[in-house]
Structures are given as C-alpha cells and as structure tokens.
Image (cartoon, rainbow, N blue to C red):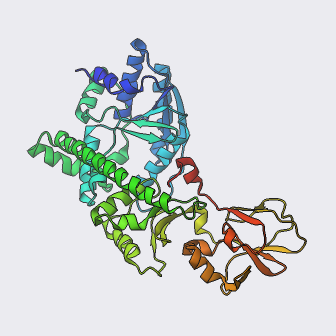
C-alpha cells in the first residue's frame, strides 16, 4: 500500500479533531510527514493543518532552521509557529531538550487538538534497544506509544510502522529538501551511537532487525496493557477498603490502604504502585524499590518516608499517602486571627473557617510543638499527642494541623470536632497540589 494511503489509514480515528499540528523540525522525517499531509489535504476532507518548529538554541547552525521551515510552510500554505525554548542544564542534554520541546507542544494544544510526530519504526527499534540496555521493565520496553495524551489534546505518531529507508526513498523520489542536523552524527549521544554504530551491524546479520524489534515492542505493549488492567482491578479493591474505613476524608491527597496492599504478592504490589505513581512522579528504577519494602515493613509506630523524584510516600493510619507540592513546605505560625468571621488564609497550608464563634478575646492559630494540653468537657486536661493517637491522625499531618488558641489556651483542633472545647467548628481546607486538581481525585 502506498505510504500516503497508510498514513491516511493511521490518521482515520483523528479526522474529526479540530486541528492537526505537525511537530516540524525541518529534518527528513517531519518534512515527509508534513508534505504528505499537505498533499492529502488537497483531496481529502481533513482538519486544518499547521506546524510547530521548536528552536532549542543549542547550536548556532540551528539559527537558520526557522527560515527554512517558514519557506517550506509558505510554499505549502501551512501556518507555522516558531517557538524558542530554554533547555535546562542537566546530566542528559537530550532528555532536557526533549522535555522542553514537549512542554512547548503541550502549551499550544487546545482541547482535542492533535500533535502529529514523525517518529518511525527505526526510532521504535532504537528506543527498545536503548531501554533494554538500561534494564527497563515491561513498561519501558513497550517502547514509544502510538497515541498518548498531551496537555489538553493528543500526541499521535502515525509513522511508527514505516521504516526510515522508506521515508528517505520517498523524499529523494519527490525531490524534497530537508535539514541535516549535524548533532545527529555525534556518537557521544547514546541514541546516535546505537543508530550509527550498533544498528548497522545488527542489520548486516539480521536485515529485518528493526521490524522484529518494533514487533517485540508491540507485544510488550500488550503485556503492559494486561498489567495495567490487573492494577486497576487491584486498585478498585484497595480504594473500596479506604472508603469503608472512611477516616480523614478531608485530606485531599492521594492515598491507598496499606492493609489491602500488603495482602497482594510483592510483584502485584509493585505493579499497583507503578500504575498509581505513573501519574504522580517519575518511576523509580529497580534499585530504589527497596524504599517501598522499608516503608511497607516498618514497625507500626515508625514514620518511614520513601522519597521519589517529585514527592514522598508516607505511612499513617494503615494507609500510604503521597505528599508533594505545598505538603513538602513547612507552614508558618503563629498567626493572629483578627477577624474570625472571615476565612483565614494560612501560608503554604490552605485556609481556615470558624463556625459558631460568638466570643470576645484573642485568637491565634499555631502548630504543634509538643506538650500541648486540651481541657475537654467531662475528660479534664488531656495530652494532645494522646488525643491525636486516639483519632488516628497520620504523623505527617500533625505538624501542620491548625490549632486554635483562645487567650493563650488551646480550645480547638481543626477538622476534629470531638476535640473542640466550645460549641464551634474549626474547619480546615488543607493545601492541594495544583497537579491533583488537574488530574482529578486519586481516592
């Protein structure tokens, strides 16, 4: 089947999208993709097509590329956006540039729009080999996904079943002109080393090596899908256990029942956690999973922490809790509450409301320092630490749980009405990581 027809078939599910954007570097692959799409749009009813060129500013020769891309797009009548990005320094320049590039793409996708990327079968084979050499698991060896969410839209790779040689032949046959990035020849980069030094040797002995490796990635993708489905089954049971228990529903942070997790085999525990953590942080490598074992097996009175790339897992009240964003910042106190009729904003710690309060006096919000006592009706003076133990408040919450003092005496603990001295309610809305608000509830 001709390449144009295969491309149209691959894009069939996306023909009702409001717009197609092409990630246009000006190189061979994206040039072929853009020109084929322009041809198809002349005879097919397709969404409007535009292009995005990301300028990383990493080499002086790249300063000429936007002009080349504009020339191509003007000739085709395709709208072009040129986006300049700042690549943050780090251990991997390739990785940092990729993150900057996809962040720029994500910002420019409106709801349901599609970004088309020209990665092909040889890219898939190289990715599989690269990740295999790094010791990746099934999720990593599943390779480059053909479709995934990106920002408010979708990223689609319609050429993953097409070889680089076919794209090259198409470009030369049609007389296309493209940019040759000199950095693609530098074998100091791992992927370039595989492309120029390793893959040619494999193809000499096994001419269909790229096709076979891409097919293996498809099989591993199916295996990962089955693991995802198993994880969802296990997560449903775990979340049911959380809802039945019903404590601390006012904590707006992701949590899982530790009791239900420990009932699974170690392999299924890791599978559930990989699936759950995938939306929260970069997944740990094999060596760092010892942190999960230590957290899971710690004594009941311990306070273990498993630190990951963008947050921490804590243990408390027979559950595990994901803390990130404002939850990793110590709140400031004390705070004088001069207008108790107005909601009080707490620095890095959400907000407070006071209902049913009708007294005169000095109100102050503090956080636990240790040794606090609370005079409860019918129970006398009780140690706050013991009362929080009775209420099962997780340890990581206690240092930021707002305490209300009236004329210097502790009179209420936020969200624990059983610990209020008077007939009023201290309602705390804890901080929420903005990422969770976008992704929805993890309960």
Look at 83% across and 73% down and name the residue there: 363
Q: Is residue 362 above or below residue 129?
A: below
Q: Is residue 349 above or below residue 11?
A: below
Between residue 22 and residue 351, name the one nearer to us: 351
Between residue 92 and residue 59, name the one nearer to us: 92
Lateral position of residue 8 relative to residue 153, left or right: left
Indicate the position of residue 155 as horizontal and vertical percent values.
42, 37
| Residue 23 seen in this snapshot | no
Look at 46% across and 50% down and name the residue there: 99
Q: Quadrant of residue 214?
A: top left
Indicate the position of residue 396 as horizontal and vertical percent values.
56, 73
* Quadrant where the N terminus is found in the figure: top left
Q: Is residue 432 above or below residue 337?
A: above
Between residue 367 and residue 79, name the one nearer to us: 367
Between residue 324 and residue 28, name the one nearer to us: 324
Look at 47% across and 44% down and name the residue there: 102
Indicate the position of residue 259 as horizontal and vertical percent values.
40, 68
Look at 81% across and 63% down and name the residue there: 356
Q: Is residue 269 above or below residue 101?
A: below
The residue at the far top in this view is: 43
Lateral position of residue 108 relative to residue 285, left or right: right
């Amino acid at each position: 089947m001709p390449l144009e027809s295969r491309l149209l078939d691959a894009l069939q599910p996306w023909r009702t999208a409001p717009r197609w954007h092409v990630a246009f570097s000006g190189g061979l692959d994206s040039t072929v993709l853009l020109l084929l799409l322009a041809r198809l749009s002349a005879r097919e009813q397709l969404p409007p097509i535009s292009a995005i060129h990301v300028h990383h500013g990493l080499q002086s020769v790249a300063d000429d590329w936007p002009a080349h891309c504009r020339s191509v797009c003007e000739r085709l009548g395709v709208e072009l956006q040129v986006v300049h990005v700042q690549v943050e320094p780090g251990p991997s320049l390739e990785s940092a540039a990729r993150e900057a590039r996809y962040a720029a793409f994500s910002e420019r996708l409106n709801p349901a729009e599609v970004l088309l990327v020209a990665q092909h079968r040889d890219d898939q084979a190289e990715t599989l080999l690269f990740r295999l050499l790094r010791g990746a698991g099934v999720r990593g060896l599943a390779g480059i996904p053909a479709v995934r969410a990106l920002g408010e839209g979708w990223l689609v790779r319609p050429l993953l079943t097409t070889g680089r040689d076919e794209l090259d032949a198409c470009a030369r046959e049609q007389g296309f002109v493209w940019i040759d990035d000199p950095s693609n020849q530098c074998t100091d980069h791992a992927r370039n080393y595989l492309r120029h030094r390793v893959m040619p040797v494999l193809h000499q002995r096994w001419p269909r090596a790229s096709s076979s490796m891409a097919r293996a990635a498809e099989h591993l993708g199916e295996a990962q899908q089955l693991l995802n489905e198993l994880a969802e089954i296990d997560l449903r049971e775990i979340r049911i256990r959380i809802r039945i228990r019903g404590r601390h529903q006012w904590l707006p942070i992701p949590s899982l029942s530790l009791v239900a997790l420990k009932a699974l085999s170690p392999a299924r525990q890791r599978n559930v956690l990989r699936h759950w953590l995938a939306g929260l942080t970069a997944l740990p490598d094999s060596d760092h999973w010892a942190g999960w074992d230590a957290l899971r097996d710690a004594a009941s009175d311990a306070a273990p922490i498993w630190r990951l790339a963008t947050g921490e897992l804590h243990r408390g009240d027979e559950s595990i809790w994901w803390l990130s964003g404002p939850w990793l910042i110590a709140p400031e106190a004390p705070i004088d509450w001069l207008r108790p009729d107005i909601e009080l904003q707490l620095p890095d710690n959400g907000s407070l409301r006071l209902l049913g309060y009708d007294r005169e006096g000095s109100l102050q919000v503090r956080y636990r320092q240790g040794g606090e006592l609370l005079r409860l009706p019918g129970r006398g003076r009780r140690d706050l630490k013991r009362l929080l133990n009775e209420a099962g408040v997780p340890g990581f919450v206690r240092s930021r749980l707002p305490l209300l003092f009236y004329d210097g005496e502790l009179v209420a603990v936020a969200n624990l009405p059983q610990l209020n001295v008077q007939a009023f309610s201290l309602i705390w809305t804890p901080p929420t990581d903005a990422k969770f608000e976008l992704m929805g509830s993890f309960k």
